[in-house]
Structures are given as structure tokens and as C-alpha cells.
Image (tube, rainbow, N blue to C red):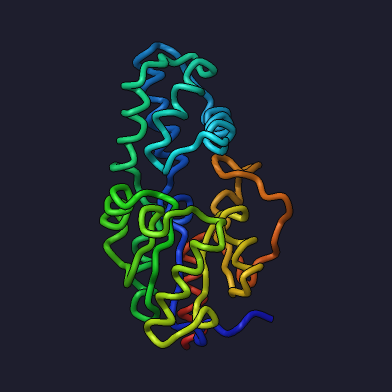
Amino acid sequence: MPRNLNEFRYMTFDVVGTLIDFESGLSGCLAEIAAEAGVTIDAEEALALYRAARYSDATDLFPDDLVRVYTIIAPQLGLPAEKAYGERLRDSARNWKGFADSRAALAELAGSYRLIAMTNARRWAFDHFSKELGEPFHAAFTADDTGTEKPDPAFFEKVFAFVESEGASKDDILHVAQSQYHDIGISRKLGMTNCWIERRHAQKGYGGTIEPEAFTEPDYHFTSMAGLADAVRQARG
């Protein structure tokens, strides 16, 4: 049985994909470019192509890497391959929306826990995401801050050091994320208690997120942030 939700002092959050709907943001921008070019695209195909292009040896930090990714996937989607369109895709991150339940759930959870963002996005993008989410975080760690990306254990070690500076430990953290590959698997290996937010529960496949080598059964499992907030409310009576 997982630990009681009342036992944690912190919740750490993956941001892009868990709280921010990056798949809709990506596919929406690509659809706009396609409409201007007089073609149509399939959103799931676009996400699969994005995933294949994003996770290669030539990757840059996210979302800056979307410029490179666009030039790779554009010909496969029948889109114009000019760099300017890739820059447009990158800059669309400034307008990506949170999932419908993210902001309210985070506001409620912030009343009971210290919330920490853990994102592979660069700081410039995270600043927009945080504003979209209502600025709920006690602290935030981005790829710029850590010099690495999840699932690198070094990213998590930076967060462990921070909570230790506040007199706590990783045992005081519930790690919340949608990505099996970037978060759930590695958090289990590092001995954290985790919570899987299965955002794609009504869809097949892994969408824009890389598929893990093996599925990790989480300690907690919800299909929405609202589900987690409800569980916390019930645990606190």
C-alpha cells in the first residue's frame, strides 16, 4: 500500500505533459501552418514524427529544439520546411495552455504542500508555463538550472539537495508526472513515492512522449490532476 497522502511535505511536478498540454500546443501550431499551406495533418501522426525527431543524438534543450525538429518533420507532413516556421513552432510554447484541471488543482494542493516544478524545458518557457498555471510553485528546477534533463538522476539529485536545505528529504516528496520514461520509472529507481497522471488514458500509445523500455506500476494513479486533488481532500477529511 502507498503511504498516506498526509505524510508528504512536498509535491514535485513534471510540467510539460502533466500540467501543460504540450501535445495540443504542438499539433495546434502545426495545424495552423498546414492550413496556411493548404494541407491537412493528422495530429497523432505529427506527434509520432515529433517524438522520433526529438529524441535523437542531436537534440538541443526544449523547446528551442523545436526549430530543428520542425525542419525534419515538415517534409513528412507536407509542410513548408523553412526555419522561420520552426521558430514559430518554438515560440508557440509561450501560448501553450494548461490542462483544464491543472490551475485549480495546483492552487488547492499548494495549501497543503510545497510544490516544486521539475521541467526539461528552459527557464524562458517555464516562466510562461508558471504564469499560465497561476504561479503556484514554491521552487522550480529547469534544464537551465540543472544542466541536464530527466530521466538523468542528477536532475533529481538537485531537487533532493534543495529539500534537504529546508530540513527535509526525498522521503517527504510525492513526485507527480505523466511520463513513464522521464519520471515514473526513474523516480521509482531513486526510491521516491510517485503518482502517475495518465493524461492519455483515453488514447492509444504514448503520443509525443518517448515510450519506456518497461512500464512502472506507480504508487498512485489518476487520470487527471483533479483526481489527485480529490484524493488529497479525502485523505485530509
Looking at the image, which residue sits at the far top? 38
Which of 46 and 101 lies nearest the eye of the viewer?
46
Give the residue at x 61% y 53%.
Answer: 181
Which of 80 and 97 lies nearest the eye of the viewer?
80
| Vertical placement of residue 81 versus 130, above or below | above
Give the residue at x 46% y 80%.
Answer: 233
Tell me where residue 177 appears, x and y as whole percent. Answer: 52, 60
Horizontally, is 120 left or right of 42 in the view? left
Q: Quadrant of residue 207?
A: top right
Give the residue at x 43% y 82%.
Answer: 164
Tell me where residue 116 appears, x and y as whole percent. Answer: 39, 69
Horizontally, is 20 left or right of 216 in the view? left
Which of 155 and 83 lies nearest the eye of the viewer?
155
Horizontally, is 76 left or right of 32 in the view? right
Looking at the image, which residue sits at the far right? 214
Tell me where residue 13 appears, x and y as whole percent. Answer: 45, 64
User: How many numbered dots are placed on residues in this image?
Assistant: 0
| Vertical placement of residue 55 versus 230, above or below | above
Give the residue at x 31% y 58%.
Answer: 133
Which of 14 and 225 lies nearest the eye of the viewer?
14
Tell me where residue 200 appears, x and y as whole percent. Answer: 57, 49
Locate the N terminus by quadrant: bottom right
| Vertical placement of residue 216 versus 56, above or below | below
